[in-house]
Amino acid sequence: MESRGPTAHRPPQIKELVSGILALAARKGERIPLATIHSIVYAMKPHEPILSGLRFSLTGDVCYSRDIDQAIHSLIDSGFLKIDGRSAVVTGRAHQFWRYMAGFLTNSRIQVIHSVSLRFHDRLRRDAKNP
């Protein structure tokens, strides 16, 4: 997730949108069950226009998105997440992700992604309290 100097504003790739949703409102040390990431984003998709390009495979009660998986691996590669068992653990560095996104997105677009990230993490924390 390294920016290569100033670039023109461009539309984000779906992997970058999902990475932003996972990263921007995360708290250091927070554990995010991997299957929960897929299910929460799937539930949010009809209500969040920026997720319209995200595709899922559904098998029974299980939903999976390759785009989400790629975003998770990208965040692992950048040192933002680490895997511990069946959960992703937030290591921090959200400020670095903000800077990366600022290299190709407008502030208003980053704020939209941050708002979706806040809703994702609110739901994640609410679901963790009431399984």
Image: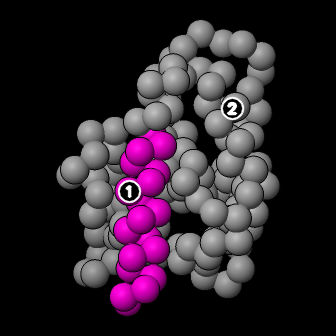
Tell me if residue 119 comes above or below residue 40 in the rendering: above
- The stretch drawn in magenta includes residue 115: yes
How busy is the neighbourhood of tag 1: few (under 14 within 10 Å), some, or many (20 plus)?
Answer: some
- The stretch drawn in magenta includes residue 33: no
The amino acid marked with disc number 1 is Arg
Does residue 85 show up? yes
Identify which residue, 125 or 40, lies in the foreground: 125
x, y (%) of residue 2?
76, 33
Residue name at image x 70 percent, y 31 percent: 99
Q: Which segment did they paint magenta?
A: 113-131
Element marked by disc 2: helix
Quarter the N terminus occupies: top right
Picture quadrant of residue 42? bottom left
x, y (%) of residue 104?
59, 21
The amino acid marked with disc number 2 is Tyr
Give the main secondary structure, helix, strand or loop, of the magenta stretch: helix
Name the residue carrying label 1.
Answer: 119
Element marked by disc 1: helix
Q: Judge left or right: residue 48 versus residue 9.
A: left
Q: Mark 2 or mark 1: name the one nearer the start of the chain.
A: 2
Residue name at image x 54 percent, y 14 percent: 9
Tell me if residue 114 comes above or below residue 63 in the rendering: above
Identify which residue, 99 or 53, lies in the foreground: 99
Identify which residue, 72 or 47, lies in the foreground: 47
x, y (%) of residue 109?
45, 27
Number of the label disc, if any, that sits on residue 100: 2
